[in-house]
């Protein structure tokens, strides 16, 4: 009878069974409840196999529903292996669980926030039921809501993670995210809108009662640290005699951690105004007591304890700064200073733009900012890099040891 069997239907001893390919594996399953193998039984087997093949093709095959007593069904359901029933919510939970073990808690907090957008849109739907166009439409809708390209791309970090897991687990035959690009990749990640020197002066004088807080901002306009690096600075990181500051940690969402990139562990040279301000800051910190802090290392698992005297705290609450508390205070402070509102993170842009506008070599600026090369500096600050080189002549002459001409002769300086 075997030579008359339809494709995929065969005898296994005295039992009729079918075979099919699922998730790259050849699966053979006996058909229960068939007491006699005849033409009707064979036709039933052939129809069942065709139904299964159609469901596999459409991405809705449920192994356990067809073969509830099969040991192999456990491989393709629940936590034992790929499951076509996995919803986006389940996928998010799985992905976040892995991220909690691998990433810093501040990063995970950001992922959880962004994952809410994905869950609200697709949460109860099965991953296999969501098309590429569904995902592209979701991306477009996020932009229409007014979210920035960076925020949308951050949300899609979650989407990409969930769908990559589903593909890796065999739930998807192809990953549609491989054909969906991030948005706004040619736009600066953060718009540079620096303070002018006049505005820096106004910021410093606006509120004498909070001079210590304003001085922190002024200092960073001439240093260019990230806010997390700035509020993580300690007395032990400063060498006033050499005019250097060592960047060894950052304070992110209430946790001290080493900079995530090795290039960000660096020595920053203090230019004139920054050094003068740091002398004032260090003098004000002379009575600060050392405290033990825990610093999370780059693997986001191990940590080290150290005793430091932190330089910056809110002058009113006495608490360490955070991104939120700086933002709240700085918004009100700019109003007092009558300076157009920008975020405190513009101090970093202020330093870079001031330096580049003054013909400071881009390589030095990149090193000060903690970039491994000049790519990001040129992308963010290209319009502040002077193109008119004629005005460089006097500066070059001075650097080469020549003074101004007098009586037709060049005088060495």
Image (cartoon, rainbow, N blue to C red):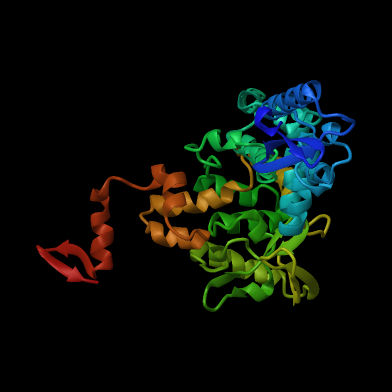
Q: Is 152 situated left or right of 224 in this image?
A: right
Residue 247 falls in which quadrant of the image? bottom right
Residue 104 visible to the viewer: yes
Along the line of sight, which residue is nearer the eye, 307 or 75? Answer: 75
Pick the residue in front: 293 or 180: 180
- In the image, is 133 to the left or to the right of 268? right
Query: Residue drawn at (74%, 72%), measured in percent from left and top?
Result: 309
Looking at the picture, tell me which residue is in the foreground, 67 or 74.
67
Coordinates of residue 314 in the picture (x, y in percent): 77, 56
Residue 108 in percent (x, y) is at: 75, 50
**Which residue, as the protein is rendered here, is positioned at the far front?**
1
* Relative to 23, 293 lies left or right: right
Residue 209 in sight in this render: no
Q: Is residue 122 above or below residue 335?
A: above
Residue at 27% from the left image edge and 54% from the top image edge: 392
Quadrant containing the N terminus is: top right
**Location of residue 334 with respect to 101 vertically, above or below:** above
């Amino acid at each position: 009878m075997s030579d008359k069997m339809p494709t995929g239907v065969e005898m296994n001893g005295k039992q009729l069974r079918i075979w099919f390919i699922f998730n790259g594996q050849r699966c053979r399953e006996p058909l229960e409840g068939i007491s006699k193998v005849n033409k009707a039984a064979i036709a039933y087997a052939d129809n069942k196999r065709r139904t299964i093949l159609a469901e596999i093709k459409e991405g809705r095959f449920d192994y356990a529903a067809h073969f509830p007593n099969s040991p192999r069904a456990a491989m393709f359901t629940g936590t034992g292996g790929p499951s076509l029933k996995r919803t986006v919510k389940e996928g998010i939970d799985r992905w976040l669980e892995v991220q909690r073990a691998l990433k810093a808690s501040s990063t995970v907090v950001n992922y959880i926030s962004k994952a809410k957008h994905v869950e609200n849109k697709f949460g109860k739907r099965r991953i296999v039921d969501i098309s590429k166009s569904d995902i592209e439409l979701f991306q477009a809708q996020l932009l229409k809501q007014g979210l920035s390209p960076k925020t949308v791309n951050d949300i899609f970090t979650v989407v990409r993670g969930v769908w990559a897991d589903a593909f890796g687990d065999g739930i998807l035959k192809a990953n549609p995210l491989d054909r969906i690009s991030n948005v706004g990749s040619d736009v600066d990640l953060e718009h540079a809108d620096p303070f002018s020197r006049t505005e820096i002066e106004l910021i410093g004088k606006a509120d004498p009662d909070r001079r210590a807080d304003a001085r922190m901002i002024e200092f960073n306009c001439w240093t260019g640290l990230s806010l997390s690096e700035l509020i993580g600075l300690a007395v032990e990181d400063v060498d006033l005699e050499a005019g250097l500051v060592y960047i060894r940690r950052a304070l992110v969402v209430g946790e001290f951690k080493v900079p995530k990139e090795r290039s960000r562990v660096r020595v920053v040279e203090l230019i004139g105004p920054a050094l003068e301000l740091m002398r004032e800051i260090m003098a004000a910190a002379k009575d600060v007591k050392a405290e033990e802090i825990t610093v999370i290392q780059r693997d986001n698992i191990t940590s080290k304890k150290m005793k430091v005297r932190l330089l910056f705290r809110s002058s009113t609450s006495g608490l360490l700064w955070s991104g939120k508390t700086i933002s709240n205070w700085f918004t009100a402070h700019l109003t007092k200073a009558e300076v157009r509102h920008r975020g405190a993170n513009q101090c970093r842009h202020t330093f870079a733009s001031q330096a580049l506008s003054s013909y400071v070599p881009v390589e030095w600026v990149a090193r000060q900012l903690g970039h491994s090369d000049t790519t990001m500096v040129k992308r963010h600050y290209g319009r502040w890099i002077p193109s008119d080189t004629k005005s460089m002549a006097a500066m070059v002459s001075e650097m080469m040891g020549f003074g101004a001409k007098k009586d037709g002769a060049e005088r060495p300086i």
